[in-house]
Image (spheres, helix red, strand yellow):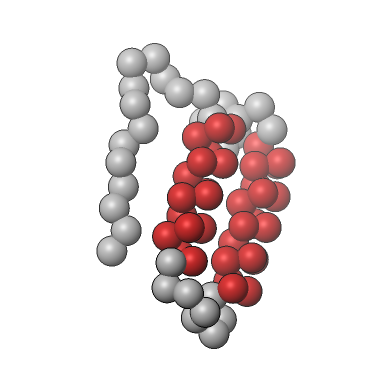
Amino acid sequence: MSRQGGAADPDGLARKLALLLEGAQALGMPPLHTGYPRLAHAAARQLIQEALPLAPNKAPAPTKLR
């Protein structure tokens, strides 16, 4: 997907997201802090936004965590 989205380094993005996921899982078991999922989501979103070019006149859609 990152390749289709136009990421300059899709493999690098995949490695960063995998590392983030591993770290979030490690911190979340047992749940030490209820905010870790939100922090991981925000970090992943930032990594993706920085790696993918934005289409002209298109802002990223906001997302809500439940």
The quadrant in which the C terminus is found is: bottom left
Residue at x 39%, y 14% (from the top left corner): 56
Residue 8, image quadrant: top right
**x, y percent for residue 55:** 42, 20
Left or right: where 20 falls relative to 44: right
Left or right: where 47 falls relative to 54: right
Seen as rendered, the residue at the extreme bottom is: 30
Whether residue 24 is situated above or below residue 50 in the rendered picture? below
Residue at x 70%, y 50% (from the top left corner): 15
Counting labels gives: 0
Whether residue 49 is situated above or below residue 58 in the rendered picture? below
Q: Nearer the viewer, residue 51 or 42?
A: 42
**x, y percent for residue 64:** 29, 53
**x, y percent for residue 61:** 31, 36
Residue 21, image quadrant: bottom right
Q: Nearer the viewer, residue 52 or 30?
A: 30
Residue at x 70%, y 41% (from the top left corner): 11
Asked if residue 4 shows in the view, the reply is no
Asked if residue 37 shows in the view, the reply is yes
Whether residue 64 is situated above or below residue 24 in the rendered picture? above
Seen as rendered, the residue at the extreme top is: 56
